[in-house]
């Protein structure tokens, strides 16, 4: 039976938050202003502290995308990834992916981000599977502003990872999951080998108390 190797994205495979990089991109092309940066900083602080109401924030963000063309979002995110994100991909993350690939493991990114942010990274690292937060698109290919529940966040990551495990014949009891965030504690507790990468303060305390492996990626 193959083993699953699951990777969080922000502050794990990528050394910073892709949301920050996306707002920077939007500001540079005239689609965002300083107020968007302030809102993002507030949400990221809540995320780091593990207190964020992710569904509420997602609905708020998606209000601005209602009626927009999904195809244009895909194209925009490919440009954004090459120009703003690629340089922030961790060397140690690339090396970990390649070690697991050489071992015959099933590779997957498991992230609360959307596929528009996650799939360019998956393509760059040649990771076939992506578990992420899916956004509803209507029959005309336009965003409705709704998230397809459950979000791939917190405990919601477990269901997505379990589905992936069933489809590709591996057990989460034997899987490894790399993450930086206390919000990922449910999935870290569910897998056989939790590995904390550049952990936030709360996750670092949990990791030390439970003697989980801690790695520092750059």
Image (spheres, rainbow, N blue to C red):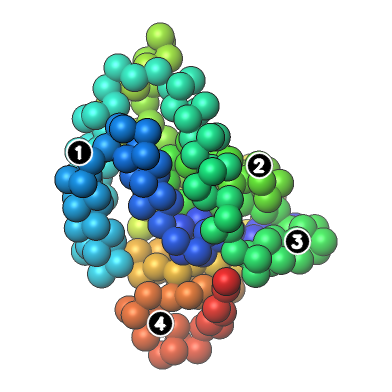
Name which of mark 3 and mark 2 comes first in the sequence. 3
Secondary structure beneath label 4:
helix
Secondary structure beneath label 3:
helix
* Residue located beneath label 1 in the image: 60
Can you give x and y, in whole percent of width and height, for residue 132 in the image?
Answer: 46, 44
User: Distance from label 4 to label 3 (Cα)?
Assistant: 25 Å
User: Distance from label 1 to label 3 (Cα)?
Assistant: 37 Å
Name which of mark 1 and mark 3 comes first in the sequence. 1
* Residue located beneath label 3 in the image: 98
Above or below, comparing residue 207 to residue 158 in the picture: below
Name which of mark 2 and mark 4 comes first in the sequence. 2
* Residue located beneath label 2 in the image: 123
Residue depicted at x 42% and y 14%? 141
Query: How many numbered marks are there?
Result: 4
Viewport quadrant of the C terminus: bottom right
Q: Which label belongs to residue 204?
A: 4
Name which of mark 1 and mark 4 comes first in the sequence. 1
User: Distance from label 3 to label 2 (Cα)?
Assistant: 14 Å
User: Distance from label 2 to label 1 (Cα)?
Assistant: 29 Å
Give the left or right position of residue 192, taking residue 139 as reference.
Answer: right
Can you give x and y, in whole percent of width and height, for residue 78 in the image?
Answer: 55, 34
Give the left or right position of residue 5, taking residue 42 as reference.
Answer: right
Cβ–Cβ under 8 Å for marks 1 and 4: no
Cβ–Cβ under 8 Å for marks 4 and 3: no
Cβ–Cβ under 8 Å for marks 1 and 3: no
Residue depicted at x 46% and y 22%? 72
Rendering quarter of residue 130: top right
């Amino acid at each position: 039976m193959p083993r699953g190797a699951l990777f969080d994205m922000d502050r794990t495979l990528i050394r910073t938050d892709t949301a920050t990089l996306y707002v920077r991109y939007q500001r540079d092309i005239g689609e965002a202003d300083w107020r968007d940066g302030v809102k993002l900083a507030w949400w990221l602080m809540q995320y780091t502290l593990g207190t964020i109401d992710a569904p509420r924030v997602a609905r708020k963000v998606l209000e601005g995308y209602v009626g927009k063309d999904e195809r244009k979002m895909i194209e925009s995110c490919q440009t954004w990834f090459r120009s703003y994100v690629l340089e922030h991909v961790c060397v140690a993350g690339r090396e970990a992916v390649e070690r697991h690939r050489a071992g015959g493991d099933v590779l997957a990114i498991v992230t609360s981000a959307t596929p528009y942010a996650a799939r360019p990274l998956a393509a760059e690292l040649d990771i076939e599977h992506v578990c992420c937060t899916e956004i509803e698109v209507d029959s005309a290919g336009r965003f409705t502003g709704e998230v397809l529940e459950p979000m791939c966040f917190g405990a919601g990551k477990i269901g997505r990872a379990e589905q992936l495990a069933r489809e590709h014949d591996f057990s989460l009891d034997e899987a490894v999951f790399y993450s930086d965030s206390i919000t990922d504690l449910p999935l870290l507790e569910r897998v056989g080998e939790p590995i904390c990468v550049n952990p936030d303060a709360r996750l670092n305390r949990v990791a030390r108390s439970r003697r989980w492996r801690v790695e520092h990626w750059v």
